[in-house]
Amino acid sequence: MGAVVGTLTMQTKQRRPSRGDKTDDELEMTMVCHRPEGLDQLEAQTNFSKQELQILYRGFKNECPSGMVNEETFKHIYAQFFPHGDASMYAHYLFNAFDTTNNGSIKFKDFVMGLSILLRGTLQEKLEWTFHLYDINQDGYINREEMTEIVRAIYDMMGKYTYPALKGDVPQQHVDAFFQKMDKNKDGVVTLDEFVVACQEDETMMRSMQLFENVM
């Protein structure tokens, strides 16, 4: 998926699609197994222009010719961008966050809706998306186990070449610091409101919570 994002930032500066390109895109969209929503509808639902959606669609289709991607394919694509670490667990959690229908696949619409929030959403939208990523069992709360799993997955993905070198207890220290600031009523879980308020009030925590944007 990182290649798709890179394609967006590079190709939007190169040229505007011709009338022929637009026709080709529309024809191509009718040929895949799972045709995405129309460009006009996606443009209205996201923060991308029609031109950017066309570029994203081409990149998505190149990597996922069927018009959808399953978890194993997603992991394979994602692992290529982190050769010095193990990205499998983080990719698993990220896949689930994009798979909003919980059907085991990500369609083009799922991908661009999530990407729109991550790249161009409001602060509130980004924090809500991040909360959804950390709330692994989707019960509306983040517990210590869930946060620990995500943080360890991030450290595993960054690999042994992370500088400075990480000690084994660093992920747990990270989680302990988060919970001390977030869990205001000390009930052992973090709600969405607690999460958003804590991130907005603490610049260091905000930067840490935005780490996932750097590993997209």
Image (cartoon, grey):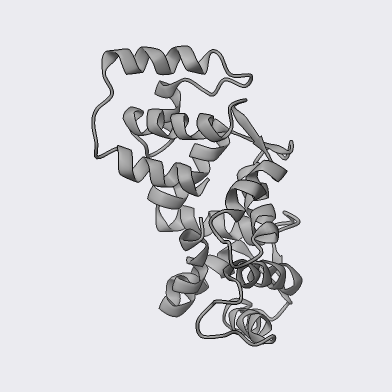
Residue drawn 71% across the image and 44% down it = 72
Is residue 172 left or right of 20 when viewed as pictured? right
Give the mark count.
Answer: 0
Is residue 159 left or right of 118 when viewed as pictured? right
Residue 116 shows up from this direction: no
Could you say which is closer to the camera, residue 124 or residue 87? 87
- In the image, residue 101 sits, relative to residue 141, either above or below, namely above
List x then y, in percent, for residue 85.
62, 67
Write down the quadrant of residue 135 in the picture.
bottom right
List x then y, in percent, for residue 165.
56, 85
- In the image, residue 136 sits, relative to residue 109, either above or below, namely below
List x then y, in percent, for residue 123.
41, 58
Could you say which is closer to the camera, residue 159 or residue 8? 159
- In the image, residue 73 sits, relative to residue 29, either above or below, namely below
List x then y, in percent, for residue 195.
56, 68
Residue 183 shows up from this direction: yes
Residue drawn 54% across the image and 24% down it = 36
Residue drawn 42% across the image and 18% down it = 25
Residue drawn 44% across the image and 72% down it = 207
Could you say which is closer to the camera, residue 170 or residue 79? 79
